[in-house]
Amino acid sequence: MPQVLPFQALRYSPEITLADVCSAPYDVQSDADRATFASRSEHNIVNIDLPIGDEPYLNAAKRFMDWQHSGVLVLDETPSFTLYRMKFTDSEGKTRQTVGVVGALKIEPPDSREVLPHEQTTPKAKTDRLELTRATKANLSPIWGLSLTAGLTTALVEPGDPVGAFTDENDVQHIVERISNKSRCAVISKLISQSPVVIADGHHRYAISRTFSAEAKNLTDANLVLCYINELIDEQLSVAAIHRLYSGTSYDDLKATLAKSFEISPIAKVSDTIISEMALNNHLTLIAIDGSGFMLTPKPQEFSGVRQLDSALLEHALKNFEHEVSYQHGLSEVRQQLTTGKFSAAVLIRPVSVAEIQRTAHEGLLMPPKSTFFTPKLQTGLVIRNLR
């Protein structure tokens, strides 16, 4: 079963305002986002987690050591878990709160049944995160794991010792607390060990951690990785869709190919409520670069034996059609991308239900790449783990 342990956390000094030094995850930031975070403080975590310039990894490592020596980053005296709560309003206007725990998750071999992948991964250069880990010898941002242990949320309700709190640019409140009580830490570790952990976000970082662990045999704790874990239940998860942007083909050819598998009918207006309309009326939505939209209603006879996920339906419909696909969450972001001239069209898909994610986990299945977008995103900089 999965092993999750408390560790001596490296944190920003209590004298530093967390809102100034934390950032969104590296893989959802644009260049403009990075510049905004960096402008907030010379000690913002992006200066290490997303280094730029000549010899970026060497500079990140030097800066990381300098911040520790100068007291910007301070090592906890004792091992602890970090309680991490997020309060936010979801896409349906509902106020929600989630709670999970940040600890050190044991890295398992690829065929492990203790730590499970959630979806297939797309080919992606992993050298960036690996080179950064080699240089800093640290886990700078947590991967996101979902525990199948029933009742984990209840065990995390009791508050820990306050560390800090702030509200980010998306009006999400992040609240951080420390649990250093050995008995409570042991209870949390035991609960998580009772059931598999499913990786929700951070598949590539988990993979490079396995590579780094094999390389760094002289580091006693390199076989563990920084991980946030919460319970895989509906009230603890807010799941958005990752939409598809198509290039390498004409709009007409794409539409004609989709027409073989979907009934296509025009939409009077692609409104801001289109995702809710899609869920209600059981369709996907094709959007042209001029903003016009079409319902894509699956033809049941064309998808016999295909898993009823929008991502799977699209993969099946386009499996013999030459094209390139990119991924983008958020309707406004999709619309913006369509104005760049890089893409022929977009297809909006519906979010995957938590029930389907649970079924996938229990049956040991994998979803197609980029099927889910878990929100809100975990902040980077709340807690760091040294690998020494």
Image: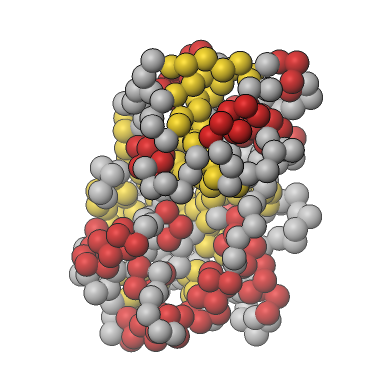
- Identified at 22% across, 67% down, the residue is 39
Residue situated in front as seen by the camera: 117 or 69: 117
For the image, the number of numbered tags is 0
- Identified at 50% across, 25% down, the residue is 285
Q: Percent from the top left, x then y, of residue 312?
A: 67, 33
Q: Is 269 on the left-hand or right-hand side of 211?
A: left
Residue situated in front as seen by the camera: 15 or 122: 122
Instruction: Decide if residue 188 is in sight here.
Output: no
Q: Percent from the top left, x then y, of residue 245?
A: 51, 41
Q: Percent from the top left, x then y, of residue 48?
A: 39, 74
Give above or below for 304 relative to 84. Answer: above
- Identified at 68% across, 22% down, the residue is 261
- Identified at 50% across, 69% down, the residue is 139
Q: Is 257 on the left-hand or right-hand side of 331?
A: right
Give above or below for 77 relative to 335. Answer: below
Which quadrant holds residue 301?
top right
Q: Is 242 on the left-hand or right-hand side of 41?
A: right
Q: Percent from the top left, x then y, of residue 43?
A: 27, 73
Instruction: Decide if residue 303 is in sight here.
Output: yes
